[in-house]
């Protein structure tokens, strides 16, 4: 295994035949997933007795999921809606793991050491420089450490600055495949999301540094920040809502305490307009998940605001973000990283924002206790601010009884009688 690799252009047939039978293949996540490569591999599945895929969040269903057990197995750290049809399949399973610990899980010698990395990469420049583009957080270390590294060279992948900048000599094999990057459409912001955003916004003051996830609530919150000044971005992702904030100067990244002048993320997910905007944009920097999500990186951020959601909150303040309707639907992802990170960052705050109900109002998301079998993704002592459309409450420093009373006050009124303090 060497950091200097052949960087050889090969056919798709040659690349697939180079994958050892029985290998564990780590796949780039988000908009960097090499879906066309996976289609070609799936069409040649008869060449393998077994292959194991490992991935994080995916924006669409990859072809091999249609043939689990014949001969594929799939492990996911954060199954997205694309995996809902296979959650009960015996050849699919979920790995509980923090996003910041991906290196520790898949590097050589780790519990799930990857034999092969397959990812998308931008077209090489004349000097051989390339970029992993829109996603680096989960697989940048494997670019140098995996026994076999295969790059799907896609002219539609933007060149994004930061730790994803690489060289063709970081790859063993390069396969030219053009495919549109999968897109994440901006969420529809409804009245509930707007109400929640109105309670979150006061906690985001000038000179704050933000982290946020996917969905209508973070998009609604970002839409309220056009009159702020000196904001920064550091975290899991950059999406379309960030463009106007950066272009207008609301986000200038000059008060973060680290990475001054640049927005830092592990993933970029959004529309084609976003992918074109980040191309060769010096104000955007991609970084390893160990920095974007790890305690060392987060401890260096000033006035860090972690904006997350969850499935449900118990009356002691503990949170379940992985289990619903009697089954696991996700892994912990970056939730533990950012909750702990906010507690060590100077001036950090952790905000959990969610609608008060699920299933069209039939289920309260504030509960007395979790269902049997549901995990505690975030312990009660990590919970700081909780927000629903009925208000915001601050739980740090509060007793168990005080916490329960505060949480009931922002639960949906239809469920107050079911919440036992």
Image (cartoon, rainbow, N blue to C red):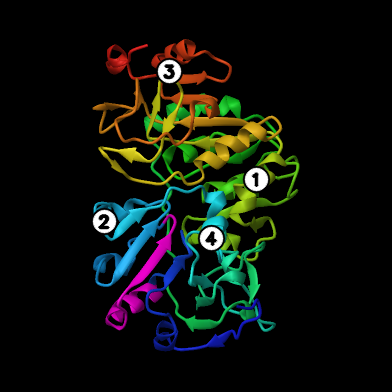
**Which is nearer the N-term, disc 4 or disc 3?**
4
Residue 418 location, x and y as percent? Answer: 28, 15
Q: Position of residue 350 (x, y in %)?
A: 56, 31
Verify whether residue 38 appears in magenta: yes
Query: Which mark, by number, is residue 110?
Result: 4
- State the image coordinates of residue 120 (x, y, percent, origin top left): 50, 71
Tell me the residue at 37%/79% (across/down). 21
* Label 3 sits on residue: 407
Residue under label 1: 248
Foreground disc of the pair 4, 3: 4
Check disc 1: other Cα within 10 Å, few if <14, some if 14-19, many if 20+: few
Q: Are marks 1 and 4 in contact (CB under 8 Å)?
A: no
* Mark toward the viewer: 2 or 1: 2
Q: Is 213 drawn above or below residue 18 in the view shown?
A: above
Q: Is residue 406 above or below residue 291?
A: above
Please name the residue that numbered disc 2 is placed on: 86
Q: Residues within 10 Å of mark 3 (few under 14, many from 20)?
A: many
**What number is the disc on residue 111?**
none
Residue at screen point 69% across, 36% down: 229
> In terms of depth relative to the viewer, which is nearer, 410 or 173?
173
Residue 131 visible in the current orientation: no
Left or right of 300 on screen, residue 352:
left
Mark in front: 3 vs 1: 3
- Earlier sequence position, callout 3 versus callout 1: 1
Range shown magenta? 36-57
């Amino acid at each position: 295994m060497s950091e200097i690799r052949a960087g050889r252009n090969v056919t798709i047939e040659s690349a697939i035949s180079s994958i050892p039978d029985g290998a564990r293949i780590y796949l780039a996540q988000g908009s960097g997933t090499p879906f066309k490569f996976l289609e070609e591999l799936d069409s040649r599945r008869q060449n393998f007795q077994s292959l194991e895929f490992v991935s994080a969040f995916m924006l669409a269903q990859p072809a091999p999921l249609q043939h689990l057990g014949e001969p594929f197995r799939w492990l996911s750290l954060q199954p997205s809606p694309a995996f809902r049809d296979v959650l009960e399949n015996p050849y699919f399973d979920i790995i509980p793991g923090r996003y910041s610990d991906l290196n520790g899980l898949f590097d050589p010698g780790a519990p799930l050491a990857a034999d092969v990395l397959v990812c998308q990469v931008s077209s090489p420049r004349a000097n051989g420089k390339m970029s992993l583009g829109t996603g680096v957080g989960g697989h940048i270390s494997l670019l140098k450490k995996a026994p076999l590294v295969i790059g799907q060279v896609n002219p539609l992948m933007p060149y994004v600055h930061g730790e994803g900048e690489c060289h063709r000599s970081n790859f063993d094999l390069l396969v030219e495949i053009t495919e549109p990057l999968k897109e994440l459409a901006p969420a529809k912001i409804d009245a509930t999301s707007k109400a929640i955003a109105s309670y979150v916004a006061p906690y985001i003051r000038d000179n704050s540094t933000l982290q946020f996830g996917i969905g209508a609530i973070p998009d609604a919150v970002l839409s309220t920040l056009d009159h702020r000044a000196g904001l920064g971005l550091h975290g899991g992702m950059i999406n379309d809502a960030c463009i106007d904030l950066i272009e207008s100067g609301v986000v200038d990244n000059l008060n973060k305490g680290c990475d001054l002048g640049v927005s830092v993320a592990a993933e970029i997910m959004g529309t084609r307009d976003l992918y074109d905007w980040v191309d060769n944009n010096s104000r955007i920097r991609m970084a390893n998940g160990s920095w974007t999500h790890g305690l060392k990186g987060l401890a260096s951020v000033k006035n860090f605001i972690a904006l997350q959601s969850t499935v449900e909150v118990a009356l002691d303040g503990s949170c379940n973000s992985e289990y619903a309707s009697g089954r696991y639907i996700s892994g912990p992802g970056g939730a533990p990283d950012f909750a702990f990170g906010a507690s060590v960052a100077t001036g950090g705050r952790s905000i959990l924002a969610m609608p008060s109900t699920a299933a069209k109002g039939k289920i309260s998301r504030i509960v007395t206790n979790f269902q049997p079998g549901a995990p505690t993704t975030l312990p009660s002592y990590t919970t700081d601010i909780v927000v629903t459309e009925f208000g915001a409450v601050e739980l740090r420093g509060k007793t168990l009884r005080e916490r329960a009373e505060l949480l009931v006050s922002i639960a949906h009124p239809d469920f107050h009688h079911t919440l036992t303090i």
